[in-house]
Image (cartoon, rainbow, N blue to C red):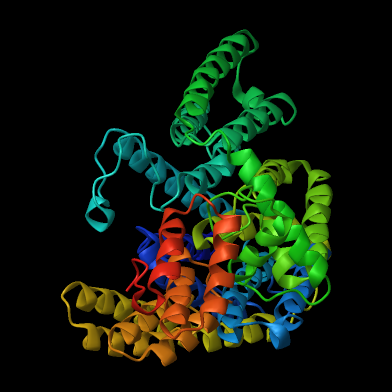
Amino acid sequence: MKTGRTGEQLLGILWAGAVTLPFLPQAYRAFAPLQDLMLVAGGSLVCLLTACRTSSGGAKGAPGWPLWGAAAAVFLMIVAPWPGAASPARHLSEAIRLGALCGIALTLPLLIGAESRRFLLRAWLVIGWLQAALVFLQLGGLDPFAAFVGPALVWRVYGTLGNPNLVAVLLLPLAVLSLDHTLLAKRRHRLLSVVILSLALCATGSRLATLLLVLGLGLAMGHLHLAAATTKARGRPMLWAGLLLLLGAAMSAAFLMGKNFNSPWGRLFFWRAALLLFYRQPLQGHGLGHFQGAYPQAAGEIAAPGAAPLALPVHAHNDWLEYAVEGGAASFLLVASIVAALWAGWQTPDKRPLVLALGLMFLAACWYSPLHTAPTALLFWTLFGLVAAVQGEGTKRRIPRLLPAGLCLIMLLGVGPMAKGVYGHLLAGRAEAAYAQGAIKEGVGLWARAVQLAPGEGAFVYGWAWGLARTGEEGKALGLAQDAAHIHANFDLYLLQITLLARQRRLAEARAHLTWLTTVFPDLQEAQLLLPALEVRPQHLSGGVL
């Protein structure tokens, strides 16, 4: 029995290492490719461990039917849009990441028992505490990552995720899990963890996450009776009153710190555009990672002049709508599988803290985009795997090693493209430095290599096209800019395309693009300045981008 428990602890430690991998290099978006690489590599390692451990009767549990439904949905979301994707390379990159997350969730029930599950969740709590400590440092103006982006405003906090909303979504389920007495046995430890994580969440200024936090803690304390299990009856009113008073003050501060009070209207516009894109290709989808490139045309169709927000969003601020746009109808199977896992898991009292944490992340994904960032997506799929797992005596059946071994092989095949993408981003950084030093030709060569290594990155194509235009190869630069416009929506990219069209005396096309841009986004000052220049001296047009 002791040997078995030691094995469970070892597996828990390995899992704890696996879940921390995406956080290690993640300071800001420049490290996003590296964290995706580490996510896929860590997932392949986990699947390999599962294949080595799993044998006849050796599995700790089995994936429940919601997990199999989610796996089928992910498979369809990867396969169906592939033929019609504007950028197969970008679709493949997103498919590798999504497939790795789903594979990790599938292998969790096979490998994780009760002891290692507690180790895994405690590791996530430690991550939450570290993120909270970093938030408090940044709130006080002590940003250890300021060297990457320069000094930030005192109230701008973002942990290691580069976005305060993502930090809030990460801390949200962990604050609720802190009330689980199987993870933290002592009441004062649970209370301290809840207070630390809640205050850090409120410090991000994320209003919806703060409301979800109050909802989650109220359900946890009122219906799950986790805190009441070790609290004396006469002490319960004081605990409730103090905690609710603290959270009320923190929530007020969060609402006061929120800067963009018009964000609900902007999100509603993004969602209308997403629905229009879904109606165009409801079955096949546009391809994973293609919402950003497809959004501008949809925004131009549904917006009255000047009604569109002056923004080209990378994501739809609703993961489920974005999956519907990119993956088609198969995304509904994914949502149904998650909802079914929540309903089935609630029937088991021991799983209710996990169900509540997963449900809060599910709701948060309706307003933010946590499933498109590796750390928060990993937490979501981890909770999903634990909630949907089937464990107990009824799971003592033969489970072949083929499942984890096959998933490991698929993830290993994705490590190569991910590694090439990381090197491509490093070359992109060198290319930007070369441009800054005036070495345009050297920068063009570096951008060309970066595009070859990471062909799905439209921003790299923009850098390459900009350099080609500066060196006189305007025809090639225009072709690259037009192709990149379907993949990576960017105001500078549109202005570059208009400028090159005008300089080649294709004035009708240039005017048509510029009219569309100024109609949809009339507050874009660069486009307004470009309009009179286009009429006066089109052959000498620079537009501020050349």
Seen at 61% across and 79% down, the residue is 91
**Image coordinates for residue 441, horizontal then vertical, percent:** 23, 88
**Image coordinates for residue 57, horizontal then vertical, percent:** 73, 75
Seen at 39% across and 83% down, the residue is 465
**Is 228 placed left or right of 141 in the picture?**
right
Question: Is 516 rendered above or below residue 450?
Answer: above
Query: From this viewpoint, is residue 358 visible?
Result: no
**Image coordinates for residue 292, horizontal then vertical, percent:** 58, 66
Image quarter of the C terminus = bottom left
**Is 4 placed left or right of 539 in the picture?**
right
- Give the farthest residue toward the left: 437
Question: Is 264 rendered above or below residue 297?
Answer: above
Q: Nearer the viewer, residue 285 or 201?
A: 285
Question: Is 169 rendered above or below residue 120?
Answer: above
**Is 166 placed left or right of 424 in the picture?**
right
Seen at 63% across and 85% down, the residue is 405
Image quarter of the N terminus = bottom right
Which quarter of the figure has residue 101?
bottom right
- Give the farthest residue toward the front: 536
Q: Nearer the viewer, residue 401 or 283?
A: 283
